Amino acid sequence: MTIRTSRSARAGQYLALLAYLVFLAFPFLWLVSTAFKPPRELGSLHPTWIPHSPTLDNFRQAFDEQPLLAAALNSLVAALSAAVIAVLLATPMAYVMARHRTKLSAAATGWVVVSQAFPFVLVIIPLFLILKNLHLINSLVGLVMVYVVWSLPFALWMLVGYVRAVPRELEEAAAVDGASRLRTLVSVVAPLLAPGIVATALFAFITAWNEFFFALVLLKTPSTQTLPVVLTHFLGAEGVADLGPLAAAACLATLPSLVVFALIQKRITGGMTAGAVKA
Amino acid sequence: MISTTAKARSGRGSRRGADHGAWFLVLPALIPILVLSVGPLLYGVALAFTDSQSGRTTATQWTGLLNFQDLLHDTLFWDSFRIGLLWAVGVTVPQFLLALGLALLLNQNLRFRWLARALAIIPWAMPEVVVGIMWRLVYNPDAGILNETVRDLGLGDGRDWLTGLATALPAVILVGVWAGMPQTTVALLAGLQNTPPELHEAAALDGAGAWRRFRTVTWPAVKPVALAITALNFIWNFNSFALVYVLTNGGPGGRTRLPMLFAYEQAFRYGQFGYAAAMGCVMVAVISVMLAFYLVGRLKGGDDQ
């Protein structure tokens, strides 16, 4: 940048950035701080940012109070299956949408947009009835089916951007060499797309791991419930002493998505840029 | 290397074959979409015209517009609808302005930018339920940091933010703004990075101040992204559920009962599937009309530039 910014303007910018950082970070820091506080400090009238005598008791108590481990396992199974299946289904379709401007592609793009506008309640009631008839209520299989379809729009959107970034000439060269369509897709396009596919899968994983509404409606028996649903069991008439385990469990539930997110942060912004350019 | 004519010929020659291949590639995704997304949506719209209920033994019957007539007189629903609009606008507008500010800052050559970028994205990665729990801890009347700060600043004893009739809605709106800022910031940042820097420099050379440079160079470049993301945010916010479910569950006295919470209760607490589906239809219809006006208005407004 050759535009010179005056010193006072720079100072103002840093101040504004600091204000943003405080606003974005303080609730998270408070959550972590609460998770490590013993009950005595939680009950104190003057809570402090840094626990005087930090403790891991809250984490132990959280595991005692609710079946967190089982819930985490349910979440993991649901999120992993949903991510893998969604990407397997979406990649070929995204390829067609990116490479062929057919009516089908237009319809699919239209659906991606429209599906965003519908309130979940209009989708969940029929899904609930359908899955009930199939005896897939209270089952992770039913939930995974819903998650797959639900994560397809964004997966398609990201993947279309990644496919567009693959040079067309490579495919044409393969076609000239006599490779079939499927062959081209598997041995030429897929390897180049791999990083984008992984990013899309991880994003679908996070979405499913964090999802709450469908899980709340579809999973009623405690043994099948996913982490977000189980977390809400901590809520209700919580006394001050229960805040510790609540915070501890919330921290644990966030860790996996934070780690995965850190891995793909750059790619997500890249994918969004690709989509934004298109828009 | 292939000559251009060969390229064109192979492209044209395989056209028909390509279309067959295309179907083969599209079907694996298309079938689940039709069965589990398009189908249920149509089914859901159809349910709105029936008396479908949970756990009933008699057959579901068509009732025509009865659900919609009932809705028209359901003041609780319209209260909830009004709250939903207040919430959606109250979240979307500050979210956009704050995110635009942050995106502009992150686009500058500031130190600690990497830290700010990482932090700015954290709320995006958190489960909504955790965001709700986190802010419940912040708002907690006794052990929360907000009241402690209020007391430290000598502004009184603090309040019970989430259960106060006057404070509940603003309090949940603030959380909504916080939670949705990352996506908006990232999208706007992407738009900003598409702005050609030469234009900025040229404008600066011509003596344009920061505000004029923003108006004439930056804004036209980010405008498409800004339009798209505010429209999406508005829809997402209007349809949001988990945050408020965890924060207040619609209380106190329905002051934060968003339409989705209301419809959820109707469907899965009282088992009124048909009635809840009708609510969903009304929500889609109103939102579509509002968005159409917004987008058409904005796009027209952009022609003069």
Image (cartoon, coloured by chain):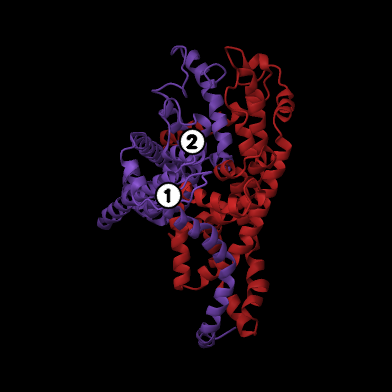
Chain colours: A red, B purple
Q: Is residue A85 visible?
A: yes
Please tell me whether mark 1 or mark 2 is closer to you in this view. Answer: 1
Q: Position of residue B81 (x, y in %)?
A: 36, 38
**What mark, if any, has residue B232 been given in the picture?**
1
In the rendered view of the protein, which quadrant contains the C terminus of chain A? bottom left
Q: Residue B304, relative to residue A182: is it above or below?
A: above
Q: Look at 69% across and 18% down and name the residue there.
A: A38
Q: Quadrant of residue A74?
A: top right
Report helix, strand or loop for mark 1.
helix
The amino acid type, in three-letter code, at marker 1 is Leu
Point out the tag, 1 or 2, that comes first from the N-terminus. Answer: 2
Compare residues A16 and A278 and report the one nearer the observer: A278
What kind of residue is marked 2? Trp
Tag 1: Cα neighbours inside 10 Å, few (<14), some, or many (≥20)? some
The residue tagged 2 is B178
Q: Position of residue B238 (x, y in %)?
A: 41, 42
Q: Position of residue B83 (x, y in %)?
A: 37, 35
* Residue A145, label in figure: none
Label tally: 2
Q: Residue at x 41, y 37 (%)?
A: B91
In this orientation, does residue B104 appear? no
Gap in angstroms between the C-alphas marked 1 and 2: 16 Å
Chain letter of the residue carrying label 1: B
- Residue count near mark 2 (Cα–Cα under 10 Å), binned few <14, some 14–19, many ≥20: many
Q: Is residue A110 left or right of residue A25?
A: left
Both marks 1 and 2 on one chain? yes
Chain ID for label 2? B
Do tag 1 and tag 2 residues touch (Cβ < 8 Å)?
A: no
Most foreground residue, B209 or A45: A45
Q: Residue furthest front?
A: B58
Q: Is residue B174 left or right of residue B211?
A: right
